Image: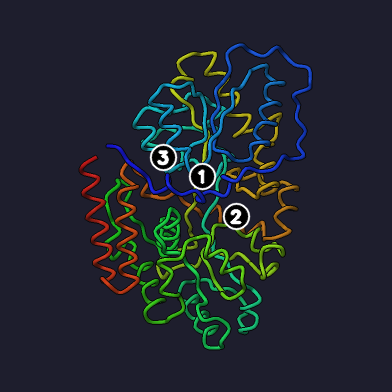
């Protein structure tokens, strides 16, 4: 079946979609090296960090003698652009892929498994949720480009004014501390969580579901979101109570998108927020935020039966069947993927360049011990706590060929419950019924 994901129409879904300025990394293009091969490797990306990508390609060409034909297109049009190329059999060998597109693209045969290439499947230094996110039906489809997760961020100055010594460790404490802050007149709506129908919605939901010990589906892909003992109920009920009873979360949350939450939180008028982790740098930038220096990350609050788990997402380098059809082309493509997604000259150069320039996350565990990374993180966040939370991140359990269609129904159901139009049980039953229907049709 043809699936249109909710991601395809969202131009702000990924902070890497903004092209980075040229970095200080010197191009190695001028270094003497082997003659360039006649047939280039075709590499496609969305328009992010373009100068950085070009510089790293030049170094690869000089090092290996393999020529690369690089193309890019804006994030908002990237998915459609690539599908058009796939259908038209345009030459593509390796490309950036979103984890949310993996089932669709794998089922269509547009990208191919890479299990036979040891350099791409050595995951000993890769976070498990990243490995899971580029695995479909037991096969791995690439190596990691970048990753991040949904974080719980608090305004330390506001907590201090309220006499609160430590950030909340549970969702019950979030509600209690928010009530204290509200009663003291420090914030009308202490909590900020986006529940608007946009592509980030599933991440906000999943972070709350996981931290409350729930799931949307089980290991076999069957709906359990409606199950009182294992599903999403505690997370949705917390949101409903926060809006309807405790009045610590504005009813307008169903119309407030992620960017609006970021702007509102940076104003200093709120205490707690679910915010993508990479936004922490912006929140602690004096030029962009009134709470610079006071935006702190805490572990995701735990539900009564939950943990500090959160949801992670990642993007990876995929490989096409075209690249694999010829042994020489396949070998050169693997070299390029490893140069970008793995090590270049013995170190994770590209990941470090992206992080230092635009603050992009990475799925490589050892980089949390890298002195340059630690120094950069220390200017705006607790690197050890950031790394600990990343180790507790998990992939979305609903990424399937029918994810996009179900996601719209699920989002509407949650919104209706938050606004008091239907009960929590009705919302989750509606969501589960749609999931089961689409699964049977697939």
Query: What crowding class fits label 2: few (fewer than 14 Cα within 10 Å), some (14-19), or many (20 or more)?
Result: some
The quarter of the rendered structure image containing the C terminus is: top left
Image label count: 3
Say whether residue 337 is left or right of residue 227. Answer: right
Of residues 137 and 42, the one nearer the viewer is: 42
* Residue 12: percent from left, percent from top: 52, 51
For marks 3 and 2 on the same chain, the one whose residue lies earlier in the sequence: 3
* Residue 348: percent from left, percent from top: 67, 37
At a point 46% along the width and 72% down the height, the residue shown is 171
* Residue 273: percent from left, percent from top: 53, 68
State the CA–CA distance, disc 3 to disc 2: 22 Å
State the CA–CA distance, disc 1 to disc 3: 11 Å
Of residues 167 and 198, the one nearer the viewer is: 198
Kindly identify which residue carries mark 1: 314
- Please tell me whether mark 2 sits on a helix, a strand or a loop: loop
**Which mark is on residue 13?**
none
Please, which colouring scheme is shown? rainbow
For marks 2 and 1 on the same chain, the one whose residue lies earlier in the sequence: 2
At a point 60% along the width and 46% down the height, the residue shown is 18
Kindly identify which residue carries mark 2: 278
At a point 30% along the width and 51% down the height, the residue shown is 406
Say whether residue 334 is left or right of residue 429. Answer: right
State the CA–CA distance, disc 2 to disc 1: 13 Å
Task: Say above or below: 322 vs 225.
Answer: above
Of residues 88 and 125, the one nearer the viewer is: 88
Q: Are marks 2 and 1 in contact (CB under 8 Å)?
A: no
The quarter of the rendered structure image containing the N terminus is: top left
For marks 1 and 3 on the same chain, the one whose residue lies earlier in the sequence: 3
Kindly identify which residue carries mark 3: 101
- Please tell me whether mark 1 sits on a helix, a strand or a loop: strand
Residue at the outermost bottom position: 184
């Amino acid at each position: 079946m043809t699936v249109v994901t909710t991601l395809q129409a969202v131009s702000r879904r990924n902070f890497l979609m903004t092209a980075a300025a040229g970095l200080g990394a010197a191009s190695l293009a001028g270094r003497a090296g082997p003659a360039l091969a006649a047939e280039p490797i075709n590499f496609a990306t969305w328009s992010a960090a373009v100068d950085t990508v070009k510089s790293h390609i030049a170094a690869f060409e000089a090092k290996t003698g393999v020529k690369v034909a690089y193309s890019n297109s804006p994030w908002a049009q990237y998915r459609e652009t690539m599908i058009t190329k796939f259908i038209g059999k345009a030459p593509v060998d390796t490309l950036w892929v979103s984890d949310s597109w993996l089932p669709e693209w794998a089922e269509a045969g547009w990208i191919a498994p890479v299990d036979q290439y040891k350099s791409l499947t050595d995951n000993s230094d890769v976070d498990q949720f990243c490995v899971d996110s580029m695995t479909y039906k037991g096969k791995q489809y690439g190596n990691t480009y970048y990753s991040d997760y949904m974080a719980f961020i608090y305004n330390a100055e506001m907590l201090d004014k309220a006499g609160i010594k430590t950030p909340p460790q549970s969702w019950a404490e979030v509600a209690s501390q928010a009530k204290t802050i509200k009663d003291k007149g420090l914030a009308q709506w202490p909590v900020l969580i986006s529940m608007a129908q946009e592509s980030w919605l599933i991440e906000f939901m999943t972070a709350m579901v996981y931290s409350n010990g729930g799931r949307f589906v089980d290991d076999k892909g069957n709906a359990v979101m409606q199950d009182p003992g294992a599903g999403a109920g505690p997370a949705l009920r917390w949101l409903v109570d926060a809006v309807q009873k405790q009045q610590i979360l504005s009813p307008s949350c169903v119309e407030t998108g992620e960017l609006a939450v970021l702007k509102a939180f940076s104003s200093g008028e709120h205490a707690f927020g679910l915010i993508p982790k990479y936004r922490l740098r912006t929140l602690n930038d004096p030029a962009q935020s009134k709470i610079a220096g006071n935006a702190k990350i805490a572990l995701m609050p735990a539900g009564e039966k939950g943990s500090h788990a959160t949801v992670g997402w990642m993007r990876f380098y995929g490989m096409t069947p075209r690249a694999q059809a010829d042994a020489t082309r396949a070998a050169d493509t693997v070299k390029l993927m490893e140069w970008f997604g793995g090590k270049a000259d013995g170190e994770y150069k590209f990941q470090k360049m992206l992080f230092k320039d635009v603050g992009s996350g990475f799925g490589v565990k050892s980089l949390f011990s890298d002195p340059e990374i630690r120094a950069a993180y220390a200017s705006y966040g607790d690197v050890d706590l950031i790394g600990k939370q990343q180790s507790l991140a998990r992939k979305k359990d609903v990424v399937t060929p029918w994810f996009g269609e179900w996601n719209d129904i699920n989002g509407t159901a949650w919104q209706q419950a938050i606004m008091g139009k239907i009960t929590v049980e009705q919302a989750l039953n509606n969501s589960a019924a749609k999931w089961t229907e689409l699964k049977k049709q697939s």
